Image (tube, helix red, strand yellow):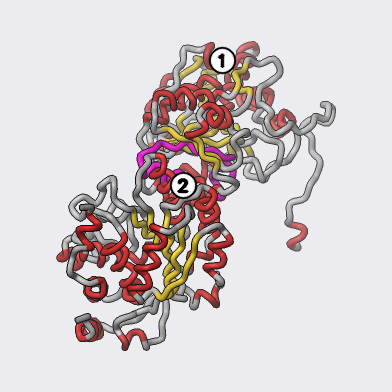
Amino acid sequence: MTMTDARRKFTPRLADPNKPRLTTSAMIASIAGEGQRTKPAPFGHALVKLAQERPEVVGLTADLGKYTDMHVFSKAMPDRFYQMGMAEQLLMSAAAGLAREGFMPFATTYAVFAARRAYDFICMAIAEENLPVKIVCALPGLTTGYGPSHQATEDLAIFRGLPNLTIVDPCDALDIEEAVPAIADHPGPVYMRLLRGQVPLVLDEYDYRFELGKAKILREGEDVLFISAGLMTMRALDAAKELEKTGINAAVLHSPTIKPLDEASILAAVRAVPGRLVVVAENHTVIGGLGEAVAACLLRNGEAPRFRQIALPDAFLDAGALPTLHDLYGISTGGIIKSVTAWTS
Amino acid sequence: MSDTQARLGSNVSLAERAYRIRRNALRMGEVQGQGYIGQALGIADVLAVSYFHALAYRAEDPQWEERDRFLLSIGHYAIALYAVLIEAGILPEDELETYGGDDSRLPMSGMAAYTPGMEITGGSLGQGLGIGVGMALGLKRKRSKSFIYNLMSDGELGEGSTWEAAMSAAHHKLDNLVCVVDFNDQQADGKSTQTLSAEPVTDKFRAFGWNAERVDGNDIEAVRAAFDRARHENGGRPSAVVCDTVMCKGVPFLEAREITHFVRVEPDEWQKALDVLDAGRPA
């Protein structure tokens, strides 16, 4: 095989050739489904509220204020906002510098740029010294149809190896609103995945509050245990409702804190109903994310249930419309239902 | 009287300070049998001016809020910084015997968590100036009059992050930031100017909106004058002081040796180097 043969090539492959061809959404597009309840820019508004209570909070971005909902903060508190320009290494080192001087910087960019471009700066300038910098990044996993340049499919794998760093993958607007003050209360550095724009509101239907470091049962079920984070929790909840109609009862354990993982709650949930199929659902590559973290936790603790992952493939993903891509890679509600039905039949 | 003025009143000359810094560094090199001694001897005059002329600090309280912050971006120059921190009374002299050893507060590459007076963890080169930008912004937020001095190497001029930070410092008018570049024309693989030339360095900084001047970094008076201009005549801009230094300065037989990033010193040569240095002690 020549090098040319091995190179990535474009091949059109719609998930379902009978479905209509959708178009790639504009950049500020929401991940919300048709008719879903949403709240606008929950991160931006929560940050303003936090900053009103905590004078040490400052906001920084690297030319992505409008695209990380930081514009809400910069408009409300212009004197506490720093536009660092298209310079992510600087964004992280300057945030470290501000933290050294007693401030609490919230620094935003896209997840790809934080994880790939600025990693060493997050590692050495922030994490090694355990500084209270809160890194909040849009476009986690597969939340844009722009292709690999914008799709941070491996950010959790990259950041999980970084000591001192707490990692949060919130599900919806409520999770984000409650996570902002919670990560501020945490004394060390945090990486939080961000859903921006019109963000779905789902978790208010459940008896739920975000607590840093805690996984919480949102729903009980005897056949399947979903363990999920981020937007995949709302997909798992939707899938569970549909699966129930076909006689498959699924529980959902939402684990928005990826690191440190709430191993006690995960083990308790797995042990509560022996024999239940464990399905970890995450908006991330199968490698190095929540799925592998849960698997390692279970094995270390002597648990080996039937185990499956719903996650993105170990591949550079396609460009296209988000719903098409989510179907293609099996992380849509329909994709989850299909996989779980096959695994339980 | 400020802490700086108190030191200015001292009758110990900067040349004597530089001699003592070199001596401390040689003694640490002797302990470890190795070390970045070429760089330490080269930068000693700049450090003497920094700690005994320019910086405000309290030896007994390294975290004093009103101190000037000295960032060692170039982590492997730690031996040189320890040498001056000992001379400044921030570290006890007997601790130099632990340099680079197990359980020592003086590791080979500088880390903030280990050493009083070590502001940042350097060593991943090209990070100090960006951290300095954030600290300078933070100082201005606090309406502090303190300054940031970032010491970096000529090799670090090859890092893109250095220029992100340089552009930002000018954009934010950080006149409380001074970047000191040790231009010894030596980096890991050879001469800096032949590895990835940053010349003309001062023109580059000026083009980025900085004050910039280049001085003989082993001429104490020239360095002192440049530091004064950076602090008091900066026109509202950040200032770069590019210091041409001679590796191994002060120990002629080492200066004459083929200079590399890691200057080889034989076990029996440390005492000889100390003797030569002592013989040249300023009057």
Residue ID for mark 1: A249
Q: Position of residue B170 (x, y in %)?
A: 52, 53
Task: Say which amino acid is labelled 2.
Answer: Ala
Q: Is residue A98 magenta?
A: yes
Disc 2 crowd, CA 10 A, few/some/many (<14, 14-19, 20+): many
Q: Position of residue B256 (x, y in %)?
A: 37, 88
Q: Circle 2 sits on which residue?
A: A94
Question: Which span of residues is magenta-colored?
Answer: A92-117
Residue at coordinates 71% horizontally, 18% vertically from top-left? Answer: A34
Helix, strand, or loop for circle 2?
Answer: helix
Q: As displayed, is residue B114 above or below residue A149?
A: below
Amino acid type of the residue tagged 1 in the rendering: Asn
Which sits in the foreground, B10 or B249? B10
Q: In front: mark 1 or mark 2?
A: 2
Q: Are marks 1 and 2 in contact (CB under 8 Å)?
A: no
Point 58% across, 24% down: residue: A41
Chain of the residue on which disc 2 is drawn: A
| Closer to us: B32 or A329 | B32
Q: What is the C-alpha distance between the residues marked 1 and 2?
A: 49 Å
Q: Main secondary structure of the magenta part?
A: helix
> Which circle's residue, 1 or 2, is located before the other in the chain?
2
Query: Quarter holding the N terminus of chain A?
Result: bottom right
Left or right: A244 as drawn, with respect to A260:
right
Quarter of the figure that contains the C terminus of chain A? top right
- Is residue B249 highlighted in magenta? no
Q: Chain of mark 1?
A: A
